[in-house]
Image (cartoon, rainbow, N blue to C red):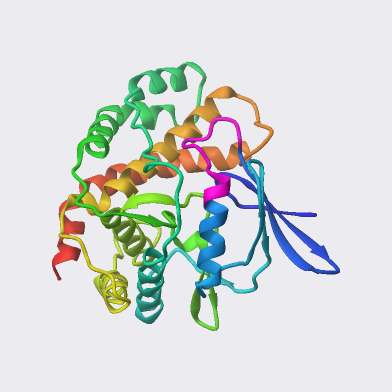
Amino acid sequence: MVRVHGGFANRMFRLDTDQGSFAVKELTVQGRRVPYRAADVFRFERAAFAAGIPMPEPIAASEHMLVHRWVRGEPVPEEPVPPAYAFEVGQILARLHALDVAWSGPAAGEPVSRDWPELAARATATGQPWAGELAARVETFLAIAEFAATCERPGPIVLTHRDIQPWNLLARAGRPVVLDWELSGLLDLSGELGSTALGIAKGPGFDDVRPAVFRAVLDGYAAGGGTLPPPGPGWFAYLIGGWLGHTRWHVLRCLTGAEAATGPEPALSHESVRAGLRGLPELYGRLPDLQDLLRR
């Protein structure tokens, strides 16, 4: 197997055999942010693949390893996608939410932690290179945590991918292919639509959000038979809460001072922490502007 670098949570390998090529993902087991439901996710993936959702064929799954057939395609850069591509992503979500697949448990909401003052103190004591940035933003991160924990979600709850972002997409003949299904589960519809539409309608920051691309996801969802929930800040609560948890997870990995046996390398964890410390306050501050996207 050949290591494929770049994963922000797990480790990926490519395995070439006389039966074809496969993507083998070694899952991070220790310190997961939410429980991984291997059997449920595999059942959902198999149903989605059988329904014609453009995705890698799921081959095998366990608590420690995922295997999919390798798919060729072009990486999707972190920049606004063409409106036609976004429209098709919306249609894919509508088809996905129409599937009748059993799920063994309730929505796996990620607990919101409010220990940012303690983390800042530990970062300072251990000489983390971003400790000053975290200390200066502790109050902002406490406010973000409060928003993520208390913001009302309009529903309904759907079984969905939960992480359709540029790094989990390919373009094959200009059309989307959806990768990395291990975070699949139950989620409020507005959270899935808001996260997906914003993720593929912008660049690395928030200065170039394309309203036409954002709306194309919603138009595609409606054209695919889906019903849009009412507008509100809840459309972005899942994205903010997930990024908050992702940042905290990488903070904790950095604070250990040693490379874990699984998951990303320390340098990538430091990069993820810096991205969260700078990007989350900006995203939170732009909530009023983002809600305007829902009314265009």
Q: Is residue 33 magenta?
A: yes
- Give above or below for 274 relative to 45: above
Q: Quadrant of the C terminus?
A: bottom left
Kindly report the secondary structure that dominates the magenta region of the rendered protein: loop
Q: Is residue 286 visible?
A: no
Residue located 32% across and 64% down the image: 197
Residue 190 in the image: x percent, y percent?
26, 56
On the rendered structure, is 243 left or right of 294? right
Residue located 29% across and 58% down the image: 194
On the rendered structure, is 271 left or right of 280? right
Residue located 46% across and 52% down the image: 184
- Give above or below for 124 relative to 102: above
On the rendered structure, is 240 left or right of 108? left
Comparing 183 with 11, the one in front is 183
- Give above or below for 196 relative to 254: below
On the rendered structure, is 155 left or right of 65? left
* Quadrant housing residue 1: bottom right
Q: Range of the magenta residues?
A: 29-40
Q: Is residue 281 magenta?
A: no
